[in-house]
Image (spheres, helix red, strand yellow):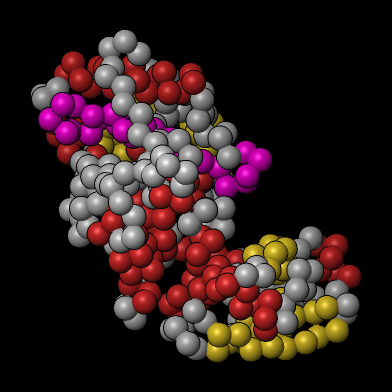
Amino acid sequence: MEQFVCVRVIMANAMDLSLFQFDYDMSFAVTFLHADRTVYSRYGSRQDKPEEADNHISMKGLAETMETVLSLHQAYPDNRAQLEGKQPRPVTKQVPEDYPELGKYKDHLDYGGAVAKSCVHCHQLHEAQRLAPWTAGEKITDAVLHPWPMPNTIGLTLDPKTMATVAKVTSRSPAEAAGFESGDVLQLLDNQRVTSVADIQWILHHAPGEAALPYEVMRNGNTVPGVLRLAKNWRQQVDIAWRTSTWDLRRIALGGAVLVPIEPAARQALNLKKDALALRVSHAGRYGSHAVAWNAGIRPGDVYVAFDSLTTDQSETDIIRHVLTQRKIGDRVMIAFLRDGQRREVRMKIQ
């Protein structure tokens, strides 16, 4: 640790977005930099289940990443080619306050009694990045709607106590098709040096809708190459329900409701087919713009069986994507739901 100059940033106010580019839904994120602003590595990832939120990070994993960063620093600038892909991409907003939705914030915190209220929270950046095109009537890209995919999206589970060691490969996944094996130590992906799960997320975040990403792993002391192929629309499999920034999308698309899958036994008790839409309302906002579903008559415990044109099995993420890609502000959608075994229908306005 003594070989690093450590700087702790506790707010996103006035943050240089041309340099600090990471998954803004993280509760802990590290950017390793050279003095000339070259990015060596990013660290910090998160699980989709709240009770397992920090399962993708560990002190041992961070230490291994830091050791590798030191070796990258010692080899710099001769290794610049392996670092080129890690560098920040051009931005349209230099600081968070440049977004209209965040323009009310100042470049400092109000320590006179309104610290939390005056702070730009990192997740608000994802919200602003989505809200800007939505309110302008423009298309929200998959990269903005499904940012920073975790490796499990492609079938890779990494050991958090290491830098980038494969713990598990999901059957019939892109990772299995690409030849990854448990125990592989990922060295290169898309010609970039991999030093953490966050590095993999960065690469996947910037991958196109259809891609062939070359990789290298260390396997039993040998370097093994391969190609990870991503099919068209692969990114749409990324679940965003766990993200704090999705809360604003629920306001827009779901009227402030939170939807969760029902258990198989509950589905059977309601006589719903396996492939039928069945999402239970676990929460419905009661205040302001988050009370649209409530004001339409939706209550916690209701089970959605139809939403607009959707009647087959869907996730909450699928419904949000449907609204953001097929509807616009002011549209009204029909929602059919079951309450006490009775089917009801309401119409709700999209925000």
Q: Position of residue 236 (x, y in %)?
A: 46, 63
Q: Position of residue 340 (x, y in %)?
A: 88, 77
310 versus 182 height, above or below: below
Q: Position of residue 110 (x, y in %)?
A: 39, 44
Residue positioned 37% across, 43% down in the render: 109
Residue positioned 12% across, 30% down in the render: 36
Q: Residue furthest front?
A: 112
Specify the segment rendered in magenta.
30-52
| Residue 34 magenta | yes
Location of residue 341 (image quadrant): bottom right
Q: Is residue 30 visible?
A: yes
Q: Is residue 207 visible?
A: no
Q: Residue furthest top?
A: 2
Front-most of residues 140 and 203: 140
Q: Quadrant of the N terminus?
A: top left
25 versus 62 height, above or below: below
Residue positioned 52% across, 82% down in the render: 350
Residue positioned 31% across, 39% down in the render: 189
Q: Position of residue 266 (x, y in %)?
A: 84, 65
Q: Is residue 156 left or right of residue 274?
A: left
124 versus 251 height, above or below: above
Front-most of residues 206 and 330: 330
| Residue 109 magenta | no
Q: Is residue 285 left or right of residue 84?
A: right
Counting every numbered tag in the picture gives 0
